[in-house]
Image (cartoon, helix red, strand yellow):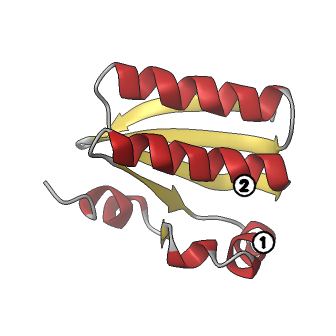
Amino acid sequence: MKMMKTRESGAARVLELQGRLVLGEPVDMLGKAVKGLLEEGHTKLVISLKGVEYVDSAGIGELVAAKKRALEKNGDVKLLMPSQTVYNVLSMLSLHLIFDIHQDEARAVGSFAD
């Protein structure tokens, strides 16, 4: 993964990912960022996949782990703007049924129940 930015958007934190979400540093970087945000009390997370061109099984596993960790803290993880390639992988694994996937950031942020 080339880089990751975290920013505030309403009541949520948005993690913007760029590049490839694959085994090794990219997955480790995402895991550490999610754990850090949850420890700080930020439990409403939106992971923007707009800049992600490829995700492998480790990347998928980390997305699922992020959601699980957030749910344990009474929060959630929403996915934002996955490319068609990434969406196809999520869909093939039926993860589109587990994740709330949005094409619009305002809707993603607004979808968190208060």
Q: Which residue bears the numbered disc 2?
A: 60
How far across and down, in percent of the image, does residue 72 sit? 36, 42
Distance of mark 2 from mark 1, alpha carbons? 9 Å
Identity of the amino acid at label 2?
Answer: Ile
How far across and down, in percent of the image, does residue 31 sit? 62, 31
Q: Which residue is drawn at 49% across and 50% down?
A: 67
* Quadrant of the rendering where the C terminus is positioned: bottom left
- CB contact under 8 Å: marks 2 and 1: yes
Judge left or right: residue 109 versus residue 46: left
Q: In this view, does 35 lie above or below 74?
A: above
Picture disc at residue 38: none
Q: Residue at x 35, y 34 (%)?
A: 8
Q: In this view, does 99 lie above or below 35?
A: below
N-term-proximal mark, 2 vs 1: 2
Q: Which residue bears the numbered disc 1?
A: 89
* Visible residue check, residue 111: yes
Q: Which of 33 and 48 is in front in this view?
A: 33
Judge left or right: residue 93 versus residue 33: right
Other-residue count near label 2 (Cα within 10 Å), few / some / many at <14 / 14–19 / ≥20: many
Which residue is outermost to the front? 72
* Quadrant of the rendering where the N terminus is positioned: top right
